[in-house]
Structure formats: C-alpha cells, structure tokens
Amino acid sequence: MAPEPLSFTVHSMPSPELSDTARRTATGRLKMLAVLVVCAAPVIASYLTYFVIRPETRNNYSELVTPPRELPDHLPLVDLAGERVKPASLRGQWLLVVVGGAACDAGCEQNLLLQRQLRETLGVEKGRLDKVWFVTGDGAPRPPVLQAIAQGAPTTVLRVPRDALARWLAPASGHTLEQHLYVVDPMGQWMMRVPANPEPAKLKRDIERLLRASASWDRPGR
C-alpha cells in the first residue's frame, strides 16, 4: 500500500500588531491606576488616621456622615445676580455651610455669625476654610445680613431650590435642614453634620482636627 501523503494544518499566528496594541493598552491602564493611587494616597491616609487608626483619641462633637455624600454635579446653583454657578467650583477648599431662607430668621443669623467667628479663630489655617450660605426660597437676602457676612473673608452666597439641596444634605432626625451647619471636604464630599445650636468651642475643635488630619494634602486656595 502506498504511503499516504503527509498533510499539514497551518493555524493562524497571532498578529504582532494586535499583541503590541493589547500590551500597550494594559500598560497604559496600569500606569493610570498607579497615578490615581498615588494622588489619592495622602487623602486616604489622612482619613484613615483620623477615623480608623486613632479612634480612641478623637471624640467628635459633630456627626460623621458615613459614607460621605458627593456634591452633585447637577445641583442647580445661581449667584445673587442670577448667574449659573457650577457646583465643581466649590471644590478645592474645606467648606462650612449654612442653609437658610432669604429672610434669614434669628437661627439663620446665629449660624452665619458662628460661621464667621469660627473661621476667624482658626488663625493661620483660616485660609483653608471657606464660608458658604445656601439661600433657599424666594426674595432677596436682607441688606444688613449681607453686610454682616461681608466682614472678613466674603461668604459665598448661592441660591438653590430647597428640595434639590435636600437630596444632598440632610438634617438629623427631628430637625430641619436649616438648623445645622454642614462640613464639606475639599473633594466636594459632605462628611460632617454639626448639631443644632452648636457649642462653638467643641465645633472649633472638630474643625481643627480635620485641618490637621488633612494638612499633608490640602492647601489654602483652589
């Protein structure tokens, strides 16, 4: 019997171009991930130090918000001239936030006064904390209130619908949105709620601890 002729099956070989592309894509993603980790490391480390590693040394007066709530990019903010303001413009600084109607009742005035006085008592660190007043409701803020909050560093005054704001900030049970002050970190995350009718010395201690914990990565100014 005559021997059968040999046959060869040729399988397609991987394209060098495709392999190089996949390798470059994977390398690029790893580099991007490494950059993100390096950038986030100081923030994560300071929060771990403050909230996890040394829990026995902290006795927070204010209530930590867990998990923190990100500032919504779609929050409809406008300034007193009616110009649209991007929420992202608030990032880059610690914020001490007051919420109140344009009429600004006695409680609102007290919170604005505390906000101003607290920032001034921070000394060299006060440049890391901005004052924000979210105005809810219709009407123009009263001139005496605007004059008062203009003392020292100006307060950022922004109008926002109350229902939209309430989807980000929230009061403690049994309280209203306007009774609290709120602390927002430089990444735009609401992370602390101040008790209603707060004790200034205890609130100042909370703020000072936050500023110390973030000193390695946060600097004054946006």
Image (cartoon, rainbow, N blue to C red):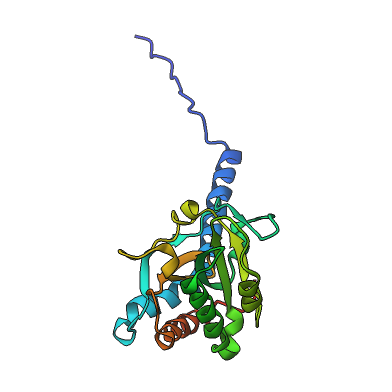
Residue 102 in the image: above or below residue 58? above
| Residue at screen point 57% across, 36% down | 15
Give the position of the C terminus as an image quadrant: bottom right
In the rendered view, does 191 fall on the left or right side of 89?
Answer: left
In the foreground, 101 or 19? 101
In the foreground, 187 or 19? 187
Residue 207 in the image: above or below residue 15? below
Do we see residue 41 in this rendering?
no
Q: Position of residue 209 (x, y in %)?
A: 44, 84
Q: Position of residue 127 (x, y in %)?
A: 61, 81
Where is residue 45, by image quadrant?
A: bottom left
Where is residue 1, by image quadrant?
A: top left
Q: Position of residue 196 (x, y in %)?
A: 38, 74
| Residue at screen point 55% across, 58% down | 32
In the rendered view, does 28 fall on the left or right side of 168?
Answer: right
In the foreground, 35 or 79? 79
Q: Position of residue 169 (x, y in %)?
A: 44, 61
Do we see residue 63 in this rendering?
yes
- Tag count in the figure? 0
| Residue at screen point 33% across, 80% down | 53
